C-alpha cells in the first residue's frame, strides 16, 4: 500500500524546487518551515491511511450511472467529506473566500500525494481547483460571492466543459451555444463529452464551467465565451434553488480511473426545464472565454504532470515491495540455500532503479514549475514576467515528460511483478491503466510538445529558455566542482546532455525562425523528451548536491547519468535530422 | 477492423526471411509458391472476416467460470469449430497424424494473422501446438496414437502446466507430485496456476501436459518429469472414458486477453475420483521433463514474439484508419477551409510511422527465426546444428523485442486516438491490455535477455553470433552499393548501429568470459533491445532492397534509420558502462 514519501517530497521542494530559498527570502508570506513540514506530514498521513485503502476497491466497483445520477464507489462519499473537512480542497485558494492561500508548491506536493493514493479520487479536487482559479481570475464579484466559498471548501465541486465530439484538441470547432436572456444571464444548449466528475453524489451541487458560442460570435476560437452553469441554481441567500437544465447523459467505460466518472453532459434539452436552456452566467467577457479557460488550464496541466509523478511513485513503491518479498532463482554471488529475493537480480534492479530515478526527475521538474508559479505571484513587473515565462516554459515539459514517465514506470512495475502483474487483484496493472490518460487529457502530450517548441522557446526572443539553461549550467558547474566520488561520471554525462539540449534548441529555433514549421513540428516530441531528460537529470544532481542530502542521492544521479541520459544524443539527432525522412515516409500514410 | 496485410507478410517471408530461396532450393518438400500464396490469402481472409469481428465482443464478455466449467464468449465455439474445420490447427504438425507438415514460416505467418485478429483466440491453438510439438518429440508411440491426431485436428486442445505459486520463472521450486501406479501410469497431485485455456467449452476433451516430481526425484530442475493428463480418459477405441481428477478451480481477472481463460488447475483432490490422484502418462523419461518442455517452449517463445508483431500490426492499422478519418486543427501548408485530417500533422505522422516500422522490424526478426527452424529441419549434421543455433540465438530476440514493440506500438495507438483512445468501446486500449502479457509469459523479457547473453552468445564459442552478424554486414554492403536515393542515410546509420551491436557483443562476451556475471546480467535488457533494433533495421533494408520491392519500403527503412536506430549508441554505452552505477545504486533497493 502507498506510503507518502514525505521526506523525499520535502527535500525536493526545499532543495531542488527552491522552497527553502523562497521561505528565507520571505517570498511566501508568513509561511514558515514548521507549517510546511506539518502540512506535508498530515497530507501524507491522510493520503496513505485514508485514501489509499479505497483505491483498488474503487477501481473495481467504479462509478455507476443511472438515469442521470452517478453513484460513486462505496466509501468515497465519506472519504471526500473527511478530506474537505480537513481543509485540503482550498490549499492554494484565495483566503478571502476561505482558501489557505498556500503556495502552488505546497498544493502540488499535496496533489502528488492524493493522486498517488488514488488518481481517480485526486481528480475531483483537481477539477474544482481549476474552476476556482478561473473564477478567481475572471468572475464578477457577484459570482465570486455566490460560488467561490463553497467551491473552495469543497462543499460544491467544479468541472471544465470544453470537449465536444468534433472539438477535442481543436476548440475552434466547438458548437455549444449560449443565448442572451433578458435578465443578463444566458441560456445554454449543447453536448459536452469527457467531463470529469460532471455528475456524482459527493456533493449537493456541481458548478460547471462551460465554453459556448453566442449567436453573433465570430467563427473560430475568438468567438468562444465561458459560462458558469450550476447543477442547482443558487438563491440569493446561498441556499439551493431550482434544478438547472443540465444532465449527465452517460458515463464512459474507460481503460482506467474507473472511480472518476467521465460524463457526457447535455445542456438545455428540457429535461429539467421548459426547453429555454440551462441558466448560465458569463465569466469574464463575451468571446474571451478561451483566455479565461487558459488561466485554469496552465495549472491544470502542471497538476496532470504531477499525476504522472504520483502514479510513478505509487507504482515504484509497489514494485519495490514485491521485489523485496518474492523469491525466484539465484542472484549472482547468492550463496544461501533456496531462492534469492528478486530485488537482488541485476535485471530487476535496473527496472526498479529506472522507475525510481525517472519518478524523481519528473517530480523535480513539476515542483520547479510550481516554484515558478509562486515566484510570479510573489513579484511584480519584470520579475513577475520572468517567472511567468519560466512557468510557461516548464508547464508543457512538466505535463508531458511526467505523464510519459507515469505510463513508462507503471508498465515497468507490471513487469517486475511477472505473471502476477497481469492479474488485476495484484494492483500493479491499475497504475498502468490509470496513468495512460495523463498523456492524453489537458492537451495531448504531442500538443504540449508543439506548445513548447512553437510558443515557449520563442518567449522573450529565446531569452527565457536561455536563462533557464544557464541555471542548469550553474548546477552542472557545482557538480563538476564536487569531489564526491558517488557521482561517478555524472558531471561528464549530464554536461553532454546539456550540450545536446542546447544544440537541439538551436536547431528548433532556426527551423521556426526560417518558417520551416513542418520540421519543427516533426521534432517536437523527441525535443520535449530531450528537454525533460536533461533538466530532470540536472535536478537529480541538484538534489544530491544539497547540504542536507545523503550519498544515496548522488548514487541515484549517477545511475541516471550513466544508464539513461545517453538517450539525449539520439533525440538531438532526431530533432536535427529526422524531419526529412519523416516527410517522405509520411506520404504513404494518407489513405 | 483488422485486415490481414497479406502482401507485406508474403514479401517479408519471401524476401527477408528466406522463403523464396528455400523454395527454389527445394528445402521445403513439395511446397510451391502457388500453395504458399493460397494459404496466406485464405488465412488472411479467415482472420479478417471470421475472427476479427469477435475480438472486441469477446473481450467485453470475457470467459466465465462456474463450478469448474468455463464458458467462452458468444460465438467462440462456432468460430473455433469453423477454424479447425479449415485445417488451420495442424499447419506445421506431422502429416502422419493428420498435420499439414508446412514450414514454421507458414505457421508463424498464420499465427500472426490469428493473433492480430484476436490474441485471446490465437492462444488456444498456440498452446495446443506447443503440446503437440512436445508429444511429437518425446511421447511414446502409444500416446501419440491415442492423442496426437485429435490434438492436431483441433478436436481436442492442449495446455502447458508449469507454473505454481512459488515457482514461476524458477521451475526448480515446483512441488506438484506424481506417484507411480501399478499399471505403469502415474497419479498426479497439486496445484498449477496461470494455465491458459486450462478449461473451456470449445472441445470435448483437453490434454494437459503437466510438470511434476516423483517421490524419489532429485531436488531442483533435474527432478522434474512431464506427464500427459487428459481431462477425460480415453478408451482403447478412442472414445472418451471417465472424467479424470483434474478441475479448474477458478480463472483470473486479468488486464487483457479476457477471452482467454487463465486457470488455476487442481490435480488429484478427489473431486472427480477417489482421491488416488489424476491419471497421468509419462512423456519422455522420468526426471527429464524439463528438457521435453523446452522443446515446446522454444517455438512457443517465437509464437509469443509473433503475437507482439500481431498486436502491433492490428494497433497500427486501427490508428492509421482513425488518423485518416479524424479532423482536428490545421496541418502545415493546409490551405483548405476547415480542419485537417490528423494524419497530416507531423507529430501524428511520427507516431504512425514509428508504429509501422517497428512492427515491420519485429516481424522480420520473427520470420527469420522461423526460417532458421525450418532450415534446421531441412538439413542434417553440421548444417542442422548451424541452423538450430541460429534459431536459438534469434528466439529470445524474437520473443522480447517483438513483445516490447507490441506494447509500445499499442500504447502509441491509444495516443493517436486522443481521448477516444482511453474509451474501451473505441477498441484501441484492448490492444494495449492484450499486448502487455506478451512481455511476461513464456519467460519474462528480462529472462529472455539473460538467455541471449548467457547462453546464446557463447554458442559455438561465439561463432554462431558472428556468422549472423556477417550476414547482416552483407546486407549492409548491398545497401551501401544501392544507388536508390530513397534510402537517404540509411546505410551510414545502420552501419553505425551494427558497430554498436558488435562492440556491445564484445563487451558482453568479455564480461561473461571473465566471470563478471553481474555486469552481464545488468546489461542484458538494453543489449537485447540493441540487438533487435539493429537486426530489425537491417532487415528493413533487406526488405527494401529486394527486387520485388517498391520505393516506399526504402523510405520506411530511411525513417527507421534516421529517426529510431540512433538509440543503439546509448544502449551500447549502457551495456559497456552502466553496470557499475547500477550495482552501487541498487544497494538502496534492498529493504
Image (spheres, coloured by chain):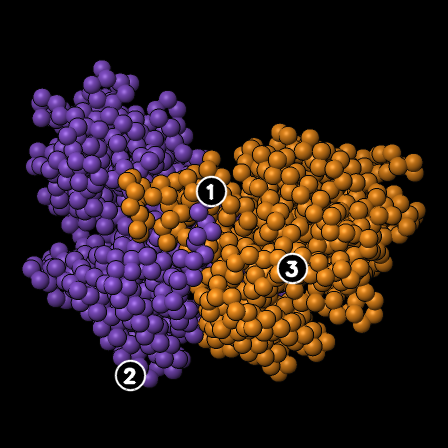
Chain colours: A orange, B purple
Asked if disc 1 and disc 3 are in contact, CB closer than 8 Å, the reply is: no
**Residue for badge 3:** A15
Quadrant in the rendering for residue B374? bottom left
Instruction: Indicate left or right for B399 with B151 as reference.
Output: right
Relative horizontal placement of residue A34, taking residue B535 as reference (left or right): right
Specify few, some or many for label 2: CA neighbours under 10 Å numbering under 14, 14-19, or 20 or more. few
Image x and y of residue A433, in percent: 52, 46
- Is the Cβ of the residue at disc 2 closer than 8 Å to that at disc 1? no
SS at circle 2: helix
Q: Nearer the viewer, mark 3 or mark 2?
A: 3
- Of residues A459 and B590, which is closer to you in this image? B590
Q: Is residue B39 visible?
A: no
Between the C-alphas of marks 3 and 2, the distance is 56 Å
Q: Position of residue A218 (x, y in %)?
A: 79, 63
Mark 1 to mark 3: distance in Å?
27 Å
Q: Residue furthest top?
A: B274
Residue, disc 2:
B481
Which chain contains the residue that carries disc 3? A
Are both tags, 2 and 1, on one chain? no
Disc assigned to residue A321: 1
Identity of the residue drawn at 84% across and 38% down: A233
Q: Residue at x 76, y 40 (%)?
A: A87
- Please determine if labels 3 and 2 lie on a single subunit: no
Q: Earlier in the sequence, mark 1 or mark 3?
A: 3
Please give the name of the residue rendered at 17% of the width and 36% of the height, measured from the top-left corner. B218
**Is residue B289 shown left or right of residue A496?**
left
In front: label 2 or label 1:
1
Amino acid at each position: 500500500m502507498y506510503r507518502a514519501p514525505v521526506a523525499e517530497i520535502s527535500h525536493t521542494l526545499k532543495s531542488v524546487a527552491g522552497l527553502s530559498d523562497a521561505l528565507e527570502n520571505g517570498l511566501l508570506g508568513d509561511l514558515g518551515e514548521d507549517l510546511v513540514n506539518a502540512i506535508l506530514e498530515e497530507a501524507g498521513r491522510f493520503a496513505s491511511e485514508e485514501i489509499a485503502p479505497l483505491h483498488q476497491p474503487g477501481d473495481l466497483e467504479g462509478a455507476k450511472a443511472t438515469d442521470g445520477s452517478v453513484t460513486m464507489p462505496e466509501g468515497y462519499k465519506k472519504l471526500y467529506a473527511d478530506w474537505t473537512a480537513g481543509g485540503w480542497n482550498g490549499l492554494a485558494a484565495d483566503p478571502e473566500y476561505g482558501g489557505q492561500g498556500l503556495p502552488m508548491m505546497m498544493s502540488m506536493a499535496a496533489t502528488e500525494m492524493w493522486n498517488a493514493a488514488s488518481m481517480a479520487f485526486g481528480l475531483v479536487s483537481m477539477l474544482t481547483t481549476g474552476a476556482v482559479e478561473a473564477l478567481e481570475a475572471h468572475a464578477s464579484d457577484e459570482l465570486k460571492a455566490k460560488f467561490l466559498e463553497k467551491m473552495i471548501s469543497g462543499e460544491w465541486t467544479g468541472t471544465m466543459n470544453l470537449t465536444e465530439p468534433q472539438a477535442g484538441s481543436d476548440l475552434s470547432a466547438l458548437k455549444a451555444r449560449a443565448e442572451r436572456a433578458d435578465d443578463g444571464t444566458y441560456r445554454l444548449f449543447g453536448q459536452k463529452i469527457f467531463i470529469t466528475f460532471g455528475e456524482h453524489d459527493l456533493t449537493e451541487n456541481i458548478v460547471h464551467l462551460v465554453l459556448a458560442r453566442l449567436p453573433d460570435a465570430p467563427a473560430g476560437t475568438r468567438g468562444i465565451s465561458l459560462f458558469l452553469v450550476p447543477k442547482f441554481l443558487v438563491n440569493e441567500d446561498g441556499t439551493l434553488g431550482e434544478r438547472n437544465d443540465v444532465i449527465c447523459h452517460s458515463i464512459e467505460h474507460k481503460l482506467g480511473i474507473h472511480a472518476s466518472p467521465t460524463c457526457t453532459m447535455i445542456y438545455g434539452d428540457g429535461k429539467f426545464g421548459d426547453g429555454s436552456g440551462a441558466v448560465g452566467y458569463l465569466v469574464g467577457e463575451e468571446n474571451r472565454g478561451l483566455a479565461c479557460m487558459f488561466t485554469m488550464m496552465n495549472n491544470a496541466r502542471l497538476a496532470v504532470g504531477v499525476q504522472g509523478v504520483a502514479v510513478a511513485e505509487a507504482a515504484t513503491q509497489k514494485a519495490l515491495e514485491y521485489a523485496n518479498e518474492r523469491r525466484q532463482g539465484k542472484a549472482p554471488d547468492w550463496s544461501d540455500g533456496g531462492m534469492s529475493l528478486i530485488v537482488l537480480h541485476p535485471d530487476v534492479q535496473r527496472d526498479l532503479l529506472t522507475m525510481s530515478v525517472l519518478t524523481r526527475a519528473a517530480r523535480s521538474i513539476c515542483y520547479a514549475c510550481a516554484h515558478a508559479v509562486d515566484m510570479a505571484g510573489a513579484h511584480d513587473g519584470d520579475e513577475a514576467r520572468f517567472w511567468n515565462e519560466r512557468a510557461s516554459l516548464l508547464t508543457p515539459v512538466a505535463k508531458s515528460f511526467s505523464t510519459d514517465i507515469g505510463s513508462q514506470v507503471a508498465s515497468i512495475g507490471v513487469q517486475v511483478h511477472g505473471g502476477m502483474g497481469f492479474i488485476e487483484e495484484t494492483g500493479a496493472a491499475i497504475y498502468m491503466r490509470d496513468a495512460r490518460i495523463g498523456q492524453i487529457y489537458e492537451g495531448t502530450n504531442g500538443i504540449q510538445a508543439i506548445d513548447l517548441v512553437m510558443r515557449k522557446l520563442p518567449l522573450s526572443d529565446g531569452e527565457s529558455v536561455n536563462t533557464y539553461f544557464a541555471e542548469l549550467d550553474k548546477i552542472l558547474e557545482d557538480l563538476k566542482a564536487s569531489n564526491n566520488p558517488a557521482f561517478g561520471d555524472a558531471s561528464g554525462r549530464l554536461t553532454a546532455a546539456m550540450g545536446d539540449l542546447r544544440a537541439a534548441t538551436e536547431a528548433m529555433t532556426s527551423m521556426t525562425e526560417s518558417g520551416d514549421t513542418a520540421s519543427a513540428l516533426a521534432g517536437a516530441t523527441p525535443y520535449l523528451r530531450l528537454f525533460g531528460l536533461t533538466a530532470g537529470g540536472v535536478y537529480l544532481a541538484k538534489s544530491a548536491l544539497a547540504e542536507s542530502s545523503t550519498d544515496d542521492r548522488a548514487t541515484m544521479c549517477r545511475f541516471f547519468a550513466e544508464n539513461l541520459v545517453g538517450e539525449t544524443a539520439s533525440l538531438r539527432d532526431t530533432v536535427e535530422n529526422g524531419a526529412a525522412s519523416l516527410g517522405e515516409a509520411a506520404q504513404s500514410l494518407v489513405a
